[in-house]
């Protein structure tokens, strides 16, 4: 496949229009060290229970030297389970020598009946991604979780809007599905993408982005930034730091013309963009973000780390409801155990994916007692107010805690 030249084209500027209120509720926030207790409000209807099903791999297509697109066949009987919004992700599950690994990957194609596709990039030292990019083939089967995530929007509300995405490396994956869908659904929407990589050879979906630009020349703007490859425009060469981003917002993308922002990449870039946009007066509610994590150096809480309860030792009673069944487990105060770890010690089917406070799969509602969350990059402010927590990051702060995964 011949490589396409990387281009940079600006969109026509237009008057910004306030975003629909329905979109605002889908934005993510970051909360560190927060404490959550029981709330009397109704649960959010925007999420559904995560469940695994075994799907067959229909195709594995190379994207770069170290990345592939994996397409799964979805049988008609599971079509509703795998209905998704562009920007969502699925978790994949596989046993390696008796040890279960789970990895989350964003869906990279717009909704198509009978299939769902993700992009996987090999991480140095990452066992799952190395296996998937080198050994996974069509005809294999894999456990695939039903789609999750709130890095999306009510697409009808983006009609006529100027949408901007900033992505790095594999952070392009959810933005591919979003760009395809937004541009196809509305003849008046505009999508602008700043996409940074080391070199041309590292650009995932290079051909697809060029073809999308050819299809929507007036409504799609692409700005490829290469950190280790010299481009004609100095602004598009080198790493995106604070100075370069400020210059981009002066020259390429005027924040006052943008209605919605989508940021996806490593923490440093996402945080830089969030801080810079906020300093420019962009309301945080119009900036959504998603962090990606690497395959290496991951916590693997399949059955929960072993915890021994010594006789007479102070404990916390943790009760959780999952699939209508309530279970109680005692957790030693000295262990500083997370709700997820305690639950996994007695029920390995408790839902989780990243175990790092990023994906939101382990979300549950606190019914009784209180917990403190170490990190949160997945729950929205209104969910926190209603008592929802990420159980992988939540530690008991009362003698008894009751959470519900089913609500």
Image (cartoon, grey):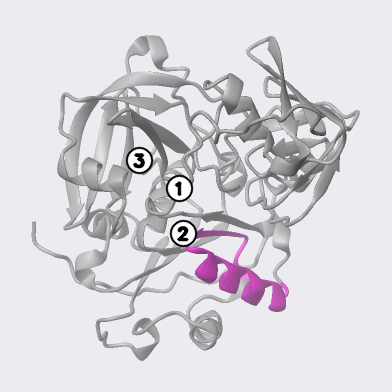
Residue 161 in picture, x, y percent from top left: 58, 56
Please check the rendered image and state whether residue 140 is part of the magenta-colored stretch, yes or no: no
Task: Give the residue at x 34% y 19%.
Answer: 54
Identify the residue under disc 1.
Answer: 178
Residue extending farthest to the front is 311
Residues shaded magenta:
256-281
From mark 3 to mark 1, how far is it between C-alphas?
8 Å
- Residue 3 as seen in the image, left or right of residue 34: left
Query: Please, what secondary structure does the residue beneath circle 3 have?
Result: loop
Q: Nearer the viewer, residue 159 or 324?
A: 324
Residue 289 in picture, x, y percent from top left: 58, 56
Q: Nearer the viewer, residue 4 or 293?
A: 293
User: Alpha-carbon neighbours of circle 1 within 10 Å: few (<14), some, or many (≥20)?
Assistant: many
Question: Picture quarter containing residue 379?
Answer: top right
Query: Please, what secondary structure does the residue beneath circle 2 have?
Result: strand
Identify the residue under disc 3.
Answer: 109
Please check the rendered image and state whether residue 259 is part of the magenta-colored stretch, yes or no: yes
From mark 3 to mark 2, how far is it between C-alphas?
16 Å
Identify the residue under disc 2.
Answer: 191
Q: Earlier in the sequence, mark 1 or mark 2?
A: 1
Q: Which quarter shows the N terminus?
A: bottom left
């Amino acid at each position: 496949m011949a490589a396409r030249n990387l281009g940079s084209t600006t969109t026509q500027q237009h008057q910004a229009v306030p975003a629909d209120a329905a979109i605002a509720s889908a934005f993510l926030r970051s909360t560190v060290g927060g404490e959550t207790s029981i709330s009397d409000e109704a649960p959010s209807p925007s999420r559904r229970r995560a469940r695994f099903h075994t799907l067959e791999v229909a195709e594995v297509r190379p994207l770069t030297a170290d990345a592939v697109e994996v397409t799964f066949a979805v049988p008609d009987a599971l079509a509703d389970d795998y209905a998704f919004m562009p920007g969502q992700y699925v978790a994949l599950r596989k046993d390696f020598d008796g040890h279960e690994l789970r990895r989350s990957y964003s869906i990279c194609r717009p909704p198509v009946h009978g299939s769902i596709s993700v992009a996987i990039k090999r991480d140095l030292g990452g066992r799952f991604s190395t296996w998937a990019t080198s050994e996974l083939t069509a005809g294999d089967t894999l456990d695939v979780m039903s789609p999750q995530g709130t890095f999306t929007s009510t697409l009808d509300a983006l009609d006529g809007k100027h949408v901007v995405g900033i992505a790095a490396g594999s952070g392009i994956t959810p933005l591919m599905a979003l760009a395809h869908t937004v541009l196809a659904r509305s003849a008046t929407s505009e999508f602008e993408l700043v996409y940074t990589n080391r070199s041309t050879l590292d650009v995932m979906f290079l051909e697809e982005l060029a073809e999308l630009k050819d299809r929507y020349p007036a409504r799609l703007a692409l700005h490829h930034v290469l950190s280790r490859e010299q481009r004609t425009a100095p602004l598009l060469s080198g790493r995106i730091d604070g100075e370069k981003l400020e210059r981009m917002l002066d020259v390429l993308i005027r924040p006052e013309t943008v209605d919605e922002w989508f940021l996806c990449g490593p923490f440093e870039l996402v945080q830089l963009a969030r801080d810079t946009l906020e300093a420019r007066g962009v309301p945080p509610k119009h900036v959504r973000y998603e962090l990606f994590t690497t395959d290496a150096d991951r916590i693997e809480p399949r059955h929960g780390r072993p915890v021994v309860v010594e006789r007479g030792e102070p404990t916390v009673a943790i009760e959780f409801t999952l699939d209508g069944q309530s279970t109680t487990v005692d957790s030693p105060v000295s262990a500083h155990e997370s709700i997820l770890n305690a639950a996994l010690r007695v029920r390995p089917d408790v839902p989780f994916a990243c175990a790092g406070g990023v994906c939101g799969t382990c979300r549950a509602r606190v019914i009784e007692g209180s917990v403190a969350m170490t990190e949160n990059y997945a729950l929205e402010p209104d969910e926190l107010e209603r008592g929802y927590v990420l159980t992988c990051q939540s530690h008991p702060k009362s003698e008894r805690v009751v959470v519900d995964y089913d609500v």
